[in-house]
Amino acid sequence: MLDTVQFTRIGQVLKSNGTDGQVIISLFGIGTEDISETEPVYIEFDGLPVPFFLSGVSQRGSSRILAHLTDVNSLDDAQELAGRAVYYPADWFEEDDDFQDFTGWTLYDADGGAVGRICGLEPIPGNPCLEIETEKGTVLVPLHEDLVKDIDENGKALTMSIPDGLLS
């Protein structure tokens, strides 16, 4: 698994499209305008980030793009990418991100104890969310200053007032 301190997940390759290596990518929290053809995206292979440059990017619906990736020139190549997560370097988001990096910390609910481990930040415009690994799976919790009750940097613990029903 990619180190979430160095990379932020921005999407997932859904499927191949056509026979020349194009793929459809679902984006999470970013728009087509945020995709750069001069900066690579990274796709995990055997636990390692492999850079790919996007070309010919076009919008397909509100959160999907049709793209051609470097060195992906056939239907077989594109099908090998299907289902894989797409990442940008985490520092790409720092320019727009006024939030502290809580990756690796433990999230606590002010009313209910430990929730789980914070494994990343989904930089959804206007609603950034912490990605939390819980016993029941991964959940997103909005990161808003009104919900934060305590930040323990020494103990790497974040306590928030989590709205009812968000974790169930």
Image (cartoon, rainbow, N blue to C red):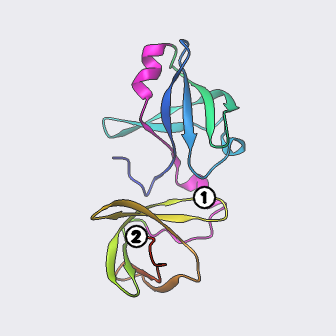
Residues in magenta, as a range: 74-102
Please give the name of the residue rendered at 37% of the width and 80% of the height, measured from the top-left corner. 108
Question: Between residues 18 and 38, which one lies in front from this camera angle?
Answer: 18
Tell me the mark number nearer the camera, choosing from 2 and 1. 2
Question: Between residues 136 and 72, which one lies in front from this camera angle?
Answer: 136
Q: Secondary structure at mark 1?
A: loop
Quarter-wise, where is residue 152 in the image?
bottom left
Q: Is residue 16 above or below residue 145?
A: above
Question: Between residues 127 and 36, which one lies in front from this camera angle?
Answer: 127
- In the rendered image, the quadrant that contains the C terminus is bottom left
Look at mark 1 in the image and give the residue it sits on. 124
Please give the name of the residue rendered at 55% of the width and 35% of the height, measured from the top-left corner. 25
Please give the name of the residue rendered at 63% of the width and 43% of the height, measured from the top-left corner. 63
Q: Is residue 127 above or below residue 91?
A: below
Q: Which mark is residue 55?
A: none
Q: Which mark is residue 167?
A: 2
Please state the horizontal and vertical placement of residue 138, each as a whole percent of the image.
Answer: 37, 59
- Amino acid type, callout 1: Ile
Q: Is residue 125 above or below residue 73?
A: below
Question: Between residues 107 and 111, which one lies in front from this camera angle?
Answer: 111
